[in-house]
Image: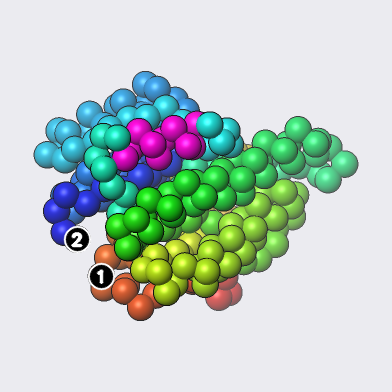
Amino acid sequence: MAKNKVAIVTGASSGIGRACAIAFAREKVKVVVARRRIEQGEETVKILQEAGGEGLFIQTDVSIEEDVASLVEKTIEFYDRIDYAFNNAGVEQSLTPLSEQTSLDFDKIININVKGIWLCMKYQIPYMLHHGNGVIVNMSSIFGLVGFPKIPIYCASKHAVIGLTKSLAIEYAKQGIRINAVCPGFIDTEMISRGSIKTPELIDYVKQLHPIGRIGTSEEVANAVIWLCSDQASFITGIALNIDGGFVAS
């Protein structure tokens, strides 16, 4: 990647988002760290700076249009460009029988996981068009490709991300913008520890779901995101890339 490029990473205060922010910084890309949590967001910027990179934290709730518009506007004000975007912010769904799921659950998950990514692209793409190119990677999941019991809202949200990705990839392909999605399997992040997969028995079961025999790391997902943003992937747009240790294949 060329120097002086700028990337926006949402949900960048921990896990995959933070790993991707660090990976961009290693490529000498300036990183705008977007997240609701101030302390963790500022901590990510500090990590980038200690590693010799450059970062800017902008507090953002991706489900709120004004926040997303402000995120993009402040990025342009500070850096005057957007070259890459990793629209990663999302929430999980606890394993719950359908009868116990609520409209509040539905609205929260869809608003962040789907509306949030739609809003990000709505405001990112016009500035990318201004420069004549750009790359966007959206966070989907293996559950955007298959179903899974007791998390239907989450599955629906991640299927929707792939639909958004493919549709806009086609719309902007001839205008120099590539848009792809990544579909991680189970990754060793806070999302796992916050959810229902806490006991050693469940962790072992989840590992066995992946033919490779383990869950993934945030860095492995970040490596794929960086590659999709690079010129090495210049003929790739509109795909949903599995990073899943063989989960979907099995």
Res 26 seen here? no
At x 67%, y 36%, the residue is: 108
Q: Residue at x 52, y 50 (%)?
A: 122
Q: Nearer the viewer, residue 214 or 235?
A: 235
- Find residue 101 and report its image quarter: top right
Sequence-earlier tag: 1 or 2: 2
The answer to which of 205 and 110 lies nearer the viewer is 110
- Amino acid type for the residue under numbered disc 1: Asp
Q: Quadrant of the C terminus?
A: bottom right
Q: Residue at x 31, y 40 (%)?
A: 76
As drawn, 38 above or below 143: above
Residue furthest to the left = 52
Please, which colouring scheme is shown?
rainbow
The image's mark for residue 231 is 1
- Percent position (x, y) of residue 61? 52, 32
Q: Spot the residue most to the front.
A: 130
Mark 1: few/some/many CA within 10 Å (<14, 14-19, 20+): few
Q: Residues within 10 Å of mark 2 (few under 14, many from 20)?
A: some
| Residue 9 locus on image (x, y percent) | 37, 44
**Magenta part mainly helix, strand or loop?**
helix
Examine the structure image and report whether residue 130 is included in the region drawn in magenta.
no
Q: Secondary structure at mark 1?
A: helix
* Circle 2 residue: 1
Q: How many marks?
A: 2
Q: What span is in magenta?
A: 67-76
Badge 2 amino acid: Met
**Cα distance in 3D space between marks 1 and 2:** 7 Å
Tell me the SS state at disc 2.
Answer: loop
Q: Nearer the viewer, residue 76 or 97?
A: 76
